[in-house]
Image (tube, rainbow, N blue to C red):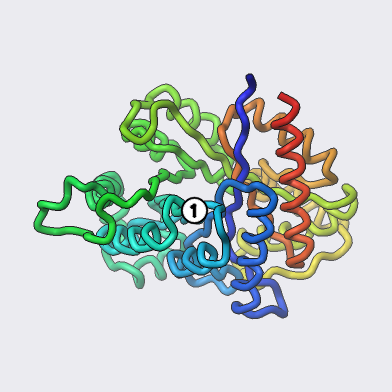
Amino acid sequence: MKKQIEYSILDLAIVSQGTTLKDTFNHALSLAQAAEVEGYTRYWLAEHHNSVAIGSSATSILIGKIAEGTKKIRVGSGGIMLPNHSSLIIAEQFGTLGILYPNRIDLGLGRAPGTDQETAKAIRSDFYQAAMSFPEEVQKIQHYFSNDNASAKVRATVAEGVEVPIYILGSSTDSAHLAAKKGLPYAFASHFATTHLMNALKIYHQEFQPSEVLERPYTLAGVNIIVADTDEEAERISTSLYRMIIGLLTGRRGYMQAPTEMTNELRELSKNPSVHQMLKYSFIGSKETVKKQVKLFIADTQVDELIAVTNIYDGQARIKSYQLFATIMRELNAEG
């Protein structure tokens, strides 16, 4: 029997022009509630700082809001950028979340700053030293969640024995070695870091060591998804994403702009090598078009789970895209 591919959401809480942060957070909850109905496995929130267009900065607080407003969908971090934080505090935060929302909280951990260099230093003056000790800090968190830590001098008492699965996030091959060595599930940020995806997955599978939490490798891959009724409508909606990425690459960051008709100029810019590389795993079109693309991606990567990133200006169009993507995944899983 063919394996069932799980499907999930990564949300950056993108702020659209003309909306407020409160609107953005309320929309995140509406999306999570719709995702729960559509059978999504998990709803993850990112960690980014010093960006007007991204509302997901206080990740653990937003996770609490989403978990409180839903019933069964898993909610977690995609991810907590651990060098920005004390491992003890993160264990306490997620232990508390795990007690409040049992068997529903995930802790995805990454080592990037999720921001620019100056902001990274403002968050933590020794950020780069902290990034180098990422493996040791992951180990500390595992200890804090273990009942074996009850006799230690330093404890995260609200985390001990609480069921919060840890995921290693990555955008290069370094994280693949670590996830494999620790026997933890591995999520690759292929929705923007496309270059090393195949190599990272290969390393993870080759080096994987079974652990108490995972017998065999488990992989998740980020993909950009925009699904609409027609290819033309999806292309029009995607102009907001292309403008956002071009702004990111040219240092002109701002709120997500309303879509326009695709212009020749924007189409040319979208073919720029940097833009094209960043959005390599972007599946944009009608349900039929995206289904073919997703089927090929799953066949090529053999991942266990897709994490869909859908950055769309209009909230209702975004929810509709996720509903259509859920239909695609149900159909692919049923085809066997």
Residue in the picture at 60% in, 38% down:
6
- Compared across the picture, whether 221 is left or right of 89 comes to right
Give the image location of residue 30, x and y in percent: 66, 66
Give the image location of residue 112, x and y in percent: 41, 54
Q: Residue furthest top?
A: 1
Viewer-proximal residue, 246 or 43?
43
Q: Quadrant of the N terminus?
A: top right
116 shown above or below 192: below
Residue in the picture at 64% in, 52% down:
309
Residue 133 at least partly seen: no
278 shown above or below 114: above
Viewer-proximal residue, 124 or 312?
312
Q: Quadrant of the C terminus?
A: top right
- Compared across the picture, whether 87 is left or right of 152 comes to right
> According to the image, label 1 marks what residue?
78
How many marks the image carries: the answer is 1
Q: Residues within 10 Å of mark 1 (few under 14, many from 20)?
A: many
Amino acid type at circle 1 is Gly
Residue in the picture at 31% in, 67% down:
124
Give the image location of residue 120, x and y in percent: 38, 66
What is the quadrant of residue 155 in the picture? bottom left
What is the quadrant of residue 130 in the picture? bottom left
